[in-house]
Amino acid sequence: MSADDVSRAIRRMAHEILERNHGADDVVIIGMQTGGVDLAQRLAADISTIEEAEAGSVPVGTLDATMHRDDFGLRPVMPEALTEIPVDPTGKVIVLADDVLYTGRTVRAALDAIHSYGRPRAIQLAVMVDRGHRELPIRPDYVGKNLPTRKDEIVDVNDEGVDLGDLLGEGDIT
């Protein structure tokens, strides 16, 4: 996906979020650290533009679910990854945003983490890329691109778009 493809996908997902929730009232977008933060901010900006609301009218936060992961001791802890939930999630519709959905384990951890802050009315999941290979029964509500991959491939979502490469770093398969 090119940068323009990503922008179009985000715009489409923003429209889908508004349609499903009958507007942006009570919607809070939470970006999962670190890859989902940019997606969350871009979704909120597009929603504000579509709704012709002032920028910042859709609350945007960040969530580091590291401490809730089932493989906590096996992964590095990132001190720069912060959790900032701008409002009490109780009674709100939380849209969790992440760049890539793979096994579903990070999303499961994020669900636990969100509930430690309150009880949302609903939690929805928006991902830029769904690459398959789920290990848990988790399905996104909003998807920028379904991109079937091999387990030995990596998916990188960045400012230039989405790149597909191998684990050895021997070039992109864009």
Image: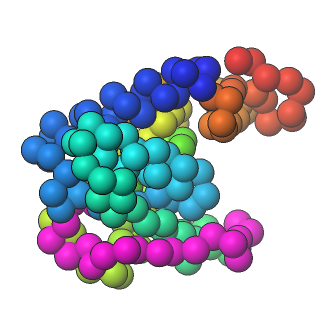
The residue at 50%/59% (across/down) is: 32
Boundaries of the magenta span: 74-94
Q: Is residue 66 something one can see in this rendering? A: yes
In the image, 158: left or right of 171? left
The residue at 43%/24% (across/down) is: 8
Instruction: Say above or below: 50 vs 118.
Output: above
Instruction: Say above or below: 99 vs 166.
Output: below
In the image, 136: left or right of 101? left
Of residues 136 and 171, which is closer to you in this image? Answer: 171
Magenta stretch secondary structure, dominant:
loop
Residue 145: give x, y in percent of width and height: 46, 26
Which quarter of the rendering shows the N terminus? top right
Residue 71: give x, y in percent of width and height: 61, 68
The residue at 54%/21% (across/down) is: 4
The residue at 49%/29% (across/down) is: 7
Q: Is residue 122 something one can see in this rendering? A: no
Of residues 71 and 92, which is closer to you in this image? Answer: 92
Residue 164 sits inside the magenta stretch? no
In the image, 91: left or right of 129? left
Residue 76 sits inside the magenta stretch? yes
In the image, 140: left or right of 75? left
> Looking at this rendering, what residue extends furthest in the left direction?
22
Q: Which colour scheme is used?
A: rainbow
Residue 157: give x, y in percent of width and height: 63, 37
Residue 129: give x, y in percent of width and height: 50, 34
Q: Quadrant of residue 119?
A: bottom left
